[in-house]
Amino acid sequence: MKHAILGAGAIGGLIGTVLSSLGESVTVLVRPERLAKYPTNLRLERPSGELTAPAKAVATLTEPVDVLWIATKTYQLSAALEAVQALPGCVVPLLNGVDHVAVLRLRFAGERVIPATIAIEAESIAPGRFIQRAPVVRLNLAASGEPLLGAIVARLGPLGFACQFISNEQTLLWGKLCFLGPFALVTSASGKNIGEILADAAWKQQLTSAIAEACEVATASGAEVSAAQIQAFFGGAPPGMRSSMQKDVLAGREPELDAIGGPIERGGERYGIDVSTTARLMAAIRSKSGLPTS
């Protein structure tokens, strides 16, 4: 199959390297100013060893591909899509949040968009070079994608992927957001890692409250989620774990605040649910990041 990667950062690079290592044809979309120096081989450092695999780099996608994987930041999506000038067979977005799915279904034929989520700590350290920090990559996809992607997803298992096809798209999307949202908001607002948050009664309570708010909005949106399971996961998480949003805030980069916290806040207003903890955390992060208040 032919694959294209839009968003050649940590997640896009990881997906592109792994697919190419399986013998799939991979094209990476990069910014025009970076094209000349972009390497012809992708390198992914993993706990189990390094993968090196070839990939073609282009600034504009002008030839059809079977799968377009999108791994941009949510606020970069609209501008990034300008580089896609050929209609892909299907589109698999790996973005944070839930609102991007409707945006993509307006851009492409609705049935072409196969929502997905990915959970892994990874980073891009140089053009074409990526690091995977944890041994297991958790990739969940909408069940509508199984006929086309089932075979290739099955081949990811030996490379450390735990994959599922999920029939309820709301459960798929909110299942990740109910974990990511509270975690990102509390770590970013506090500047603490998960171990420090759990050791601080006040911040631990804010995490518990934010999880409950997110899950209540998710349930009202048609998702099946469990606040108790999410809470239990954090209890067993590595104490030094930090969120990507927290790292962005500390580095002075724009955080994906609207994509991650926005659906919870807007869902609270839509369904009449108290999401005051989420709103306070978002306000604190806006202040720290110099973002305009809503």
Image (tube, grey):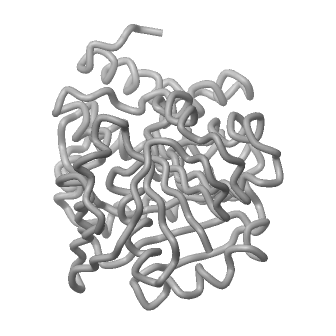
Most extreme residue toward the bottom is: 158
Residue 151, relative to residue 230: is it above or below?
below
Task: Give the side of residue 97 with respect to residue 121, left or right.
Answer: right
Q: Quadrant of the N terminus?
A: bottom right
Residue 24, relative to residue 233: is it above or below?
below
> What is the total number of numbered labels drawn onto the structure image?
0
Q: Position of residue 221 (x, y in %)?
A: 74, 42
Q: Residue sitting at 47 percent across and 23 percent down?
A: 279
Q: Position of residue 276 (x, y in %)?
A: 50, 24
Q: Residue sitting at 60 percent across and 47 percent down?
A: 62
Q: Residue sitting at 38 percent across and 51 percent down?
A: 8
Towards the viewer: 37 or 19: 37
Q: Position of residue 205 (x, y in %)?
A: 35, 41
Q: Residue sitting at 27 percent across and 13 percent down?
A: 290
Towards the viewer: 280 or 77: 77
Towards the viewer: 79 or 97: 79
Q: Position of residue 170 (x, y in %)?
A: 71, 52
Q: Quadrant of residue 214?
A: top right
Task: Give the side of residue 122 with respect to residue 144, left or right.
Answer: left
Residue 283, relative to residue 208: is it above or below?
above
Q: Quadrant of residue 232?
A: bottom left
